[in-house]
Image: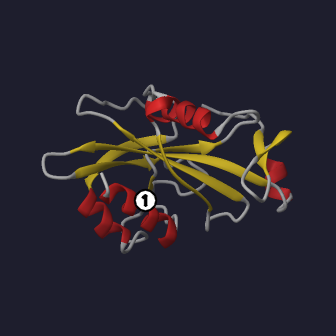
Amino acid sequence: MVHDEPWQVFAENGTAVTGFSARREEFDRDESLIMGASHIWLWRRGASEIEVLLQKRATTKKTWPGYYDISATGHIDAGETPVESAVREAKEELGTEIDADKLLYLFSLRTPLAKSEIDHVYIYEVNDAFVPEFHDGEVESVEWLSLSDFQERLKTPEEHQIVNQGDGYFTLLLDHFSEL
């Protein structure tokens, strides 16, 4: 599915600039524009430890084709909040309904992958009955990893074809998972 809505523009302090949006190509041309993205990490309680869901990006994706990435992620559309974007992206990419009130906000940061992007990171617990459905062609498959396996793979993300969100990002994420 092609999602061609304009994206919300954010200020340097991380707040949305009311009434101001831009299309992808405008963000590409103007490095002063800051876009926002929502990251949703789905997790469940496994038999012996927490498990984290990674999506394998379709090989047709422009960026990071065939790599493992965040459970569901996407840019924040004009007028949308980060939570609304998270709910929409989970539906689009994994075919799952997210209860916005049960999303747990973890942190926001400027991504090392694109300095003009602020990522809003959430986790969301699902149960064993969760079965993803792929409708939009962005996701090829998913893989559940135990938290310890995830941590091990993050030591060498490129070797495991994981989109490297940066050490700071993964440290914050793993710290929160270890508290569950």
Q: Residue at x 39, y 29 (%)?
A: 133
Side of 130 relative to 59 (left or right) = left
Q: Amino acid at mark 1?
A: Leu
Image quadrant containing the N terminus: top right
Q: Is residue 178 above or below residue 4?
A: below
Foreground residue among 67 and 9:
9
Quadrant of residue 63 in the image? Answer: bottom right
Residue toward you, 11 or 33:
11
Residue 2 location, quadrant: top right
Q: What residue sits 81% from the left and 49% below the top?
A: 25
Residue under the point 49% across and 49% down: 59
**Residue 62 location (% of width, % of height):** 61, 52
In the image, residue 3 above or below residue 161: above
Query: x and y percent of residue 76 in the render?
Result: 67, 41
Number of labels in the image equals 1
Q: What coloring was used for the rendering?
A: secondary structure
| Residue 176: % across, % down | 39, 57
Q: Quadrant of residue 71?
A: top left
Residue projecting furthest to the left: 47
Crowding near the residue tagged with mark 1, few <14, some 14–19, many ≥20 C-alpha atoms within 10 Å: some
SS of the residue under disc 1: helix
Query: From the viewer's perspective, is 19 left or right of 108?
Result: right
Q: Front-most of 56 and 81?
A: 81
Residue identifier under label 1: 173
Residue 118's x, y, as percent?
66, 56
Q: Nearer the viewer, residue 63 or 36?
A: 36
